[in-house]
Amino acid sequence: MMRLTATTACAALLALSLAARGESGLSSSTPQDSNANNSTDQLKQLSLDQLGNIQVVTYNKTPSELLKTPAAIYVITSEDILRSGVTNIADALRLAPGVEVGRMNSTTWAVGIRGLQNNFSKSVLVLIDGRNVYTPLYAGVYWDVQDMPLEDIDRIEVIRGPGGTIWGPNAGNGVINIITKKSSETQGITADALAGTQDHTIDDLQYGAATANKLSYRVFGRGFERAHEYHSDGINEDAWHQERVGIRADYSSGPDTFMAEGDAYRGNSPRIVGTTPLYDEVSGGDINLRWERNQKDSNGFYLQAYFDRTLRTNLTFFGETRNTIDIDFVHHFNLGNHNQFSYGGSLRWSPYLTIAPTTLASFVPPSGTDHVYTAFVQDEVHLGDKLAITLGGKLLNNNYSGYDLLPSARVLWSVTPHQALWGGVTRAVTTPSDLEENFLIRAEEAPSLYLQVLGNKSFMSEDVIGYEAGYRILQGDKLYVDLSSFWNQYGHLQSFTAPYINSSGGNTYINIQYQNQIAGHTSGFELAPTIAIAPWWHFHTSYSFVSSTFTANGLTSDISSSGSVNTYEKSTPRHLVFVQSKLDLPFHLQFDQMYRYASQLPAQKVNAYQTMDLRAARTFGRNVLLEAVGQNLFQPHHNEWGTGDPTQPVIGIYRAAYIQLSFSRAPHPQH
């Protein structure tokens, strides 16, 4: 098969788009029938003016206009996700500039923002409706259990850069906030059935209703089964499945809104370490409650509490049971005519028990309670109509490294109502995890000779000071451009000591221990224009550049996908290119294309690659949508991320295709 270049791909995309439009025989002003959409408004095109003025909440936990936010924030809309053809949350994050996503195998992704990409996503804070899905066991995210019907996602807000003041720890490189739709927006019955080559099946069934007293709710069930990826060694053991049920309810009264949601899941998540398949069984669930008050004078508060349970077991390695309780509060109000003042805090407790079926790997002690306590203040000062300065600071305490102070300063200059310049400096930290402090893995290399990887009770928080600047402009209804640049200075990053030897009880131990010996910086920029070529043709494009330089204060051992100078410098794509084209054609047809390019990752043994996804869809009446999607079309399979094990070949991601049939029926209006 001919290997397509980026130029050839873009030329073919343009020719195909124009040909499809030219064959219609209709004028370019013919709009798509709005009544032919799935669930009426689910696939509605967001105009550029609406995009520039969209309300975001992730920056300071209160609604603010995107154009007036002094941070590198990008919004992935519901329509972007549905028309990209992705089938999971991790792959949907590729739509945002500066977000690096590498699929390691069928069940595992490495996600990063502006560098430090790794298979735990440890420097990125991930939230679902404000609920933190970070696990202190690995200092990261279990992407395999973050799932929901994608049509329930209202938007994903992505902050690139440190988010320390408002969100606290583990937001060193950014924040990803997945925000679901209110239950009042998902009324009626919806059902989706998917069949494909890799995603063998994904099935959703959902029902939403409302009562006369402003209470609305929805319930859903979801299940999927996915095939294994390409293994050159023939160990095809990463096929998996998962089932989930969930509910959300919303109620409003004057300025107050209340939300309650929860879900429960179970399934498996196999993976391979070296040549050994590990068959993880996963289950869990959560309950999330929120009370929010937003008054017209910008006064209000936000109170959220949730409980999360995670259970992950493995008969050959180790597992974890963890219960997390979190309470988060923010109060914002005006101080005079020019100050918007906020303060708040959070309490997080997370008791856990690690399960080690063998003596090969364990945590010492095997159980405990992780905690993080935070308090913050922030003041947004408006100097006239065009200039705003935001100063803030957060104090946090955790059970491993004690206290940390996270200050922040940001400035916004609204040059015109549709043009803004901003800049900022922020300090953020990634707190230690159980892995870095309590881990113990021991392997017998020869009689009475053992190799050990040890946690370090003196492991410190990793820190970053981020310097940022950006520019946004909305040019009529044709062009929206977002440009941001950054310089991140890191200290105390995770590393390993050089091997050292000690003897005890007649045995000899070769030890490698976690340390904080690496420091350095990353720099770069992201350019993300959105272009409305015509009312029926929209382009979302982005280019991201990252340069990395790190040094070690001592000898380090390159035994992991993180923890050495080589892996920090050469595990992030220097160049990322993304193009999403969305065509609304006559006869209720949609034709969408998604092209991406990622440069090489030498430390992960991954070459540069480019690929494309195509989606064709047609609506039938008001209730039925039929889609056909091809994914990763340029190659039979390609590599995106390493395994962290030099003895294991990199796993390839297959070319795939699927068809999906969706049905929706809104409730009959009540008279």
Image: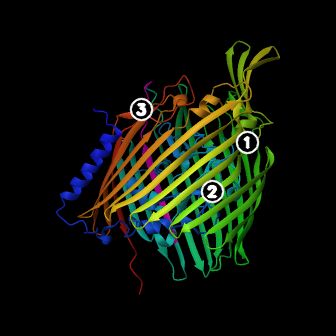
Q: Position of residue 79 (x, y in %)?
A: 42, 61
Instruction: Determine the secondary structure under disc 2.
Output: strand
Q: Residue furthest bottom?
A: 671
Mark 3: which amino acid? Tyr
Q: Position of residue 130 (x, y in %)?
A: 62, 60
Mark 2: which amino acid? Gly
The image shows a total of numbered marks equal to 3
Determine crowd level at label 1: few under 14, some 14-19, many 20+ residues with C-alpha closer than 10 A: many
Residue hosting label 2:
423
- Residue appearing at x 71%, y 74% in the figure: 333
Q: Position of residue 69 (x, y in %)?
A: 59, 63
Residue hosting label 3:
230
Residue 618, picture quadrant:
bottom left
Determine crowd level at label 3: few under 14, some 14-19, many 20+ residues with C-alpha closer than 10 A: many
Left or right: 222 with respect to 162? left
Sequence order check, earlier mark of 2 and 1: 2
Q: Which residues are magenta?
A: 217-233
Q: Is residue 226 magenta?
A: yes
Front residue (pair 451, 85) = 85
Instruction: Determine the secondary structure under disc 1.
Output: loop
Q: Nearer the viewer, mark 2 or mark 3?
A: 2
Determine crowd level at label 2: few under 14, some 14-19, many 20+ residues with C-alpha closer than 10 A: many
Which quadrant does the N terminus fall into? Answer: top left
Would you place residue 176 above or below residue 276 in this image?
below
The span from disc 3 to disc 1 (Cα, nearest Å) is 34 Å
Residue 346 in sight from this viewpoint: no
Residue hosting label 1:
432
Q: Is residue 539 magenta?
A: no
Mark 1: which amino acid? Pro
Q: Position of residue 214 (x, y in %)?
A: 54, 80
Residues marked 3 and 1 touching at CB (< 8 Å): no
The span from disc 2 to disc 1 (Cα, nearest Å) is 29 Å
